Each structure stands twice: as C-alpha cells, then as structure tokens.
Image (cartoon, grey):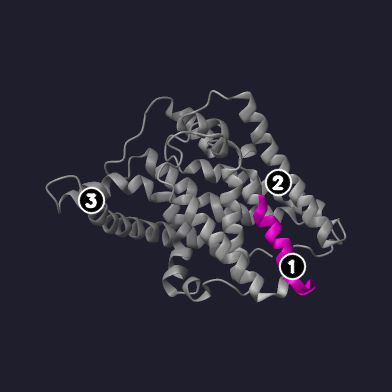
Amino acid sequence: MRLGERISGPWPWRSYLAKRVLRIVPAYYATLFLVVLGAFPLYQFSQEFIGLRVGYHLLFLQDYFPANFIVAFWSLAVEEKFYIIAPFIVLGITKVPKLTWRVTSMLIILLCCVGLRIWTAVRHPEINNYQQFFFVFRSPFHMTLDPILLGVLLAFLYQARDKVNWLQSKSMAHLVFWAGAGTFLVVSTNSGMLDVITWWDKTLQPLVIGLCFFGMTYGLLFGGGAKAIFRSATLFFFARVSYSLYLVHLALSPLAMALAGMFTASTPSLIVFFPVFLGVSVAASLLLHYGVEKPFLILKARIP
C-alpha cells in the first residue's frame, strides 16, 4: 500500500510486520550471537550478566539499557520501535485531507519532540559530558524520534509531487540539497563537537542534522543535487551491503588495527588503518549479506 493512498480495508499488519522482521532481525541476531561467541578476533566485551544483556538485546531494548556488545546497536533499537509506531502515525496523518494540514500535523509532532528535549535539558542542567548526554538525550527512543519523523514528512511530500507546483521545481530541489549538504559540512567539521555538552547539543542539534539529510534526500528525490555521484555503482554497492556493514564494522576495528600495525612500527596512522579497516569490514559484510541477510530478503520479497 502506497503512503497517502485512501485506506479502504484493514491495515495489512501481518504482512508489514513479517517484512520488517525479515529485513532486520535475522542479520542482527546472527551478528549478536557471533559477538557473544567470540567470533570476531581481538574484539572484547564485558562478560558480566551476559544472559541478561543478551535478553534485552534480543528485545531491542539497548537504547534504554547499555548497548554493551556493539555500541552502534542502540540506533537499531530506536528504528525497531519506530517501525512499530509508524503505521499509526501514517494512518492518522492520511486521515487529514490536505497536504498543508498533513505537513502542519507532522511539524507539530516534531516540535513536541524538540520540546521534550528542552524540558529534559531544563531538568538536567548538570549534564555536561558525553556519557551522561548519550544515555539521557541521545540513546532513548523517545528522545531521538524527530529526525526519523522527517523521513515520514518527506514521504508525504513525495507522494504529493504531481499535485503541488512547488514540489516540481528543480531549482528548489537544488537549493534544498546544497543547503542541507552545506549545513551538515559546517556542523560535522566543528573540531570541538560534543567535547563539552551544550544546550545546543541537548536540544536542537539532532533536529538540525536530521534536517540536513532531509534536505539532501529531498533534493535528490525531486531532481536536484549531485545526482551523478549518488547514482554511481560504488554507492549502489555500499547501499546494498550497508546494513550488514553497519552491524559488523565496529567489532572488526581491533582486528583491522592489528593488521594495519603489521605495516608500521608505531601506532598505525589513519591513512594506513582506514584501507585495512574498510577491506576487512566489506569482506565480513559480504559474508553476512549473502550468507544471512540475502536469503531472508528473498523470502521477504515473496510476501504480498
């Protein structure tokens, strides 16, 4: 069912849920158990309360509890919860008859998310280091929802592209793309980013970074931006294995560091380390993609 279509029958929740599970869970569970079994050379983690930790990782609760197998898994827990609530958001918004009202509804929800962070910042002025910031402001699902909701907003705009004149403007698409790319470059290259946690980091930074990627995606979808670069075969390859690469790359960093150290007498520089890290990570992601992820994606494609 396409976003924005009139819903005339019951929501196909079984099909939706099955597709989400097949897309996300098998490769994640496989990686989680490989980590627990020590399959990643030189990668170490705490062995305390390992059964409890595996349990809440299996339930995708590592955004509220420590993601202490692979720290990047916190964001996967956020995504999974979003997939649960997304149908309700979409179904609710599609009941609104006009695009302007739909956009307004989405913006109100986004502002509520920002308001929650502002309220939390007022309650916790003592938080000034990254570890505290991460567990209170960055990791929990309810604190990180607005950047994801921007994707829903973009989907509504894309569905209405043939009905709204300004959505057909390529000059607008170019402007929005480069505004997003330029702003992200400025924000991400700040040498002191998150060294000291400020009010900006606690409240507006997630939304602004989300808006940067919203702008770049908007530009590409509506005919603007650096389309040739994003259509390259190299990026298509990395897009295909991106989920598997996300799952395994951090667990391979100690191995890559050791291998890179074979080429230098001192601590490997980034120039030496990165090619080794990329090669090891891509090789492992290909094994995970074709050995676990791909078979379930084929099964997912068969679900009506």
As drawn, the label of residue 159 is 1
Q: Residues within 10 Å of mark 3 (few under 14, many from 20)?
A: few
The three-letter code of the residue at mark 1 reads Gln
Q: Label 3's element? A: loop
Please give the range of residues in magenta. Answer: 149-166
- Residue at 39%, 25% in the rendered image: 48
| Amino acid type of the residue that numbered disc 3 sits on in the rendered structure | Ser
Q: Residues within 10 Å of mark 2 (few under 14, many from 20)?
A: some
Instruction: State the mark number for residue 110.
Output: 2
Identify the mark at residue 269; answer none if there is no mark: 3
The tag earlier along the polypeptide, 1 or 2, is 2
Q: Are marks 1 and 3 in contact (CB under 8 Å)?
A: no
Question: Element at badge 1?
Answer: helix
Above or below, 49 against 118 in this view is above
Which element type, helix, strand or loop, lies under badge 2? helix
On the rendered structure, is 157 left or right of 283? right
**Mark 1 or 2, closer to the camera:** 2
- Residue 240 visible in the shown view: yes
Residue 185 lies, in percent from the top left, at 47, 56
Residue 43 x %, y %:
31, 40
Does residue 59 sit above or below 85 in this rendering?
above
Query: Is residue 39 found left or right of 133 in the rendered image?
Result: left
The answer for how far apart the CA atoms under marks 1 and 2 are is: 20 Å
Looking at the picture, how far across and down is residue 102, in whole percent?
80, 56
Magenta span has 157?
yes
User: How much space separates mark 1 and mark 3, taking CA atoms?
Assistant: 47 Å
Task: Tell me the kind of residue under disc 2.
Answer: Leu
